[in-house]
Image (cartoon, rainbow, N blue to C red):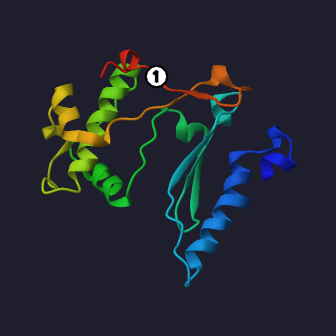
Amino acid sequence: MDGFTRSPNDVTARRLVSYNLAPALKNAFEQIFAAPLLFRGILAELGAAPADDFLWRLDYDGSFSAQSGAELAHGVVIAGPRQVAKDWTAQTPKPTLERHDLKAAAYSALRLLVWAKLRGTKDQGVEFAALPTDVPQLKEKLGAEGFEVALLDRALLGQPISYRVPTMDELGI
């Protein structure tokens, strides 16, 4: 509705989250005679410069948090259930995500997805360092859930969509 009543430049992720999505989710969550909306999402907004970028995490109960500028400087977002995030930070030695090129980042993200999946199975105690390093083995452990990637692309600013889906060749996995 906001998009129809306002200029497209006035419809921002901040406005959508703060005034539209979060209140609707909170209201649905608090209804005792209706099923709540089950939604967890990430909204990203590219600015003209990296310092103007915003990322919003929105949860099913209407709570949300924002990250901006320097917090997003690394260009990697890790999102998931709170327990997985807590387990990730408790790993010793601390796992690192490679960010020097797209293939290395995709490989690191694949390993992270497999580790997060195993945290919810009989292999819950698996350490990140103990994961296989071979891509086919990682894909096998990930299974049917697959691997989905979208790249925010500042070169597409001003277009209706500012992201692109990379080819498998670009990712190297």
* Amino acid at pointer 1: Pro
Q: Residue at x 37, y 15 (%)?
A: 169
Residue 100 visible in rendering: no
Is residue 167 shown above or below 133?
Answer: above
Does residue 126 appear left or right of residue 106 in this picture?
Answer: left
Q: Position of residue 73 (x, y in %)?
A: 53, 33
Disc 1, SS:
loop
**Disc 1: which residue:** 166
Q: Residue at x 70, y 26 (%)?
A: 157
Image-quadrant location for residue 8: top right
Does residue 17 appear left or right of residue 119 in this picture?
Answer: right
Q: Say which of 14 and 41 sits in front.
A: 41
Q: Position of residue 69 (x, y in %)?
A: 61, 38
Mark 1, other Cα within 10 Å: few <14 / some 14–19 / many ≥20: few
Q: Which of the image's four quarters has the C terminus?
A: top left
Is residue 168 shown above or below 88?
Answer: above
Is residue 65 shown above or below 32?
Answer: above
Q: Residue at x 65, y 31 (%)?
A: 161
Q: Position of residue 155 (x, y in %)?
A: 65, 19
